[in-house]
Image: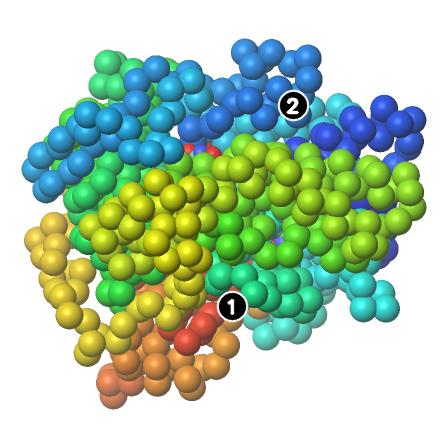
Amino acid sequence: MIQNDTVSTDVLIIGGGPSGLAASIHLADLLKQKGLNKRILLIEKGRSIGSHIISGAVIKPSVFKELLPGVDLSDIPFNAIVTKDKTVFLTEKRAFALPFHVPYMNNLGNYTASLGEICRFLAARAEGKGVEIYTGFAVDAILYKEGKVAGAKTKDTGIDHHGNKLENFQPGTMVEAKLTIFAEGTRGSLAKMLIKKFDLAKDRNEQVYSLGCKELWTIQEGSIAPGQVFHTMGYPLQNDEFGGGFIYGLKDNRVAVGLVVGLDYKDPSFDVHDAFQIWKTNPFVSSILKGGKFLEYGAKTLPEGGYYSIPKLFVDNAMIVGDSAGLVAMPALKGIHLAIKSGMLAAQTAADALIKNDTTKHFLQQYEKLVNDSFIKSELYPVRNFRQAFAKGLIPGGLHFGTQLITGGAGFFGRLKSHPDYLTTVKLSELKKKPFKERFKGKLEFDKILTFDKSTDVYHSGVHHDEQQVVHLQINNRENFNAVNIEQYGAPEVFFCSSEVYELHTSKTGEKEIRIHAENCMHCKTCDIKSPGDGITWVVPNGGNGPDFQNM
Ligand SMILES: Cc1cc2nc3c(=O)[nH]c(=O)nc-3n(C[C@H](O)[C@H](O)[C@H](O)COP(=O)(O)OP(=O)(O)OC[C@H]3O[C@@H](n4cnc5c(N)ncnc54)[C@H](O)[C@@H]3O)c2cc1C
């Protein structure tokens, strides 16, 4: 592309995750069937496909048969078929396997996998079909013509901290597109702008999120079989902290372990990364990792508001797919198959729109209809109140969810509302329980064998950011931030950040300020979601910056 100032394409896809890649593959197939020659361009901010991809992952495979007709599942680089699957309740020292599957948590017949590896496979397929994929380019603005989406622009580079142009200044490329598909994943920064500009979340529930921290390990032979899956509840989370752990057995003596925690927790000093490290010290978990070696770390948020939080999915000339649209089935911790399906349905709509030469919202509403006629709705609608039920804690939530199961999802109260996660944090002075650090006093000295501090984990994510750029984590109002986030909440950013970006600095005269080590940023987006008073905006940094995941 992408030396030119302006390029034109028929379809622009922003994001090379499962949703964007599926959209590109299916669109290329459909256009070929119709004998149409159209340009499809996909742009990914990671330096390569997969380098910003992190998931569990246990994947529901059947959608791959739809996406890749004629390809045998054994040709797809899944890791292992799930043959054993248990939910385990943890206390500090003990583990109790539940004698039944928690609803929606049966994984037998699914596959463990590295989603990064699956995305590399899909990208090769897409390129084989003529899709142009450009990695290492961050898209940071939406182009509009007469108020309608007209493509997007990649980020200018060669700019110093203050926004001044340097000698190596390179303007971004304007990519003019008849149709743009937003596939940026969780809390997409452009999707967020689009949703705001066109009020696409009107009458919807607030989106809420979890943060998942994950490590990949090699382990002693026989510690866990490939395809053996455990989900854990309980320790170290308390009643008002929603979430749990996962342990996914992989081939070649590897295991993926992680902890996913709802960002609606109250304690401003709660730290998901550190809770994850403490989780690993439970003897059931540590026995699997004993004698093994930690390979990689990563973290990302996932949208978990469910059906009522899905925004309107289309505007003139554009559609939103995958996590950017909030398509995750949270009771099952699954979004990959929904991301792929939504990408395919957007592709189907795009192909029809290009044939009819009609990309207006009147035509693109077909996409939302297709989503509602597909398994996306039939999976999300029965659990439409799931996450909201747990907002009041595990035990009331469990009872509430029980009523939803017998009433087809409605429960006794119908639609439940949700609140943005940054509103649920309480001020330090209002916290009615021991703050996180006191609760786990003596347990936060990480041994660098089983447990790791943030900087060690961050080192194992391959993260890199160019020094010369405007800091991409932007404090919306410094004065307000100091008065509210630091003084009243005790700078929760220091704790909730998955990668040690935020440091609370106290000067000799006792003045406190937040320092931002943007170079560590994992692109998890937690700060954009959880900062009290909506204090921080995450904007996309230079292309190719960020983590460099190998097999997450
Ligand atoms: C810890 C964790 C565990 C999970 N476990 C499972 C599981 O076991 N099974 C399951 O089915 N689902 C799981 N999920 C959810 C699943 O990973 C997501 O639903 C799925 O990856 C969504 O796909 P996507 O294509 O919408 O987004 P993503 O996979 O996030 O891909 C989006 C891509 O867009 C790129 N991008 C974003 N913004 C820009 C921009 N401005 N310019 C250019 N590129 C951009 C990103 O770099 C990224 O590569 C898990 C998620 C997490 C975080």
* Residue drawn where x is 68% and y is 40% of the image: 370
Q: Amino acid at mark 1?
A: Thr
Residue placed most toward the observer, 102 or 466? 102
Name the residue located 72 percent from the left edge and 30 percent from the top edge: 25
Q: Give coordinates of residue 42: x percent, y percent.
A: 72, 41
Residue of label 2: 66
Q: Residue at x 9, y 34 (%)?
A: 94
Examine the rendering and report whether any part of residue 422 can be seen. yes
Dot 1, how many residues are within 10 Å of its Cα: few (below 14), some (14-19), or many (20+)? some
| Label 1 sits on residue | 537
* Image coords of residue 14 (percent x, y): 68, 48
Left or right of residue 241: residue 314: right
Residue closest to the eye, 32 or 315: 315
Query: Badges 2 and 1: C-beta atoms under 8 Å apart?
Result: no
Q: For this view, does 415 lie left or right of residue 65?
A: left
**The C terminus sits in image quarter:** top left
Is 422 placed above or below 406 here? below
* Structural distance between the alpha carbons of marks 2 and 1: 38 Å
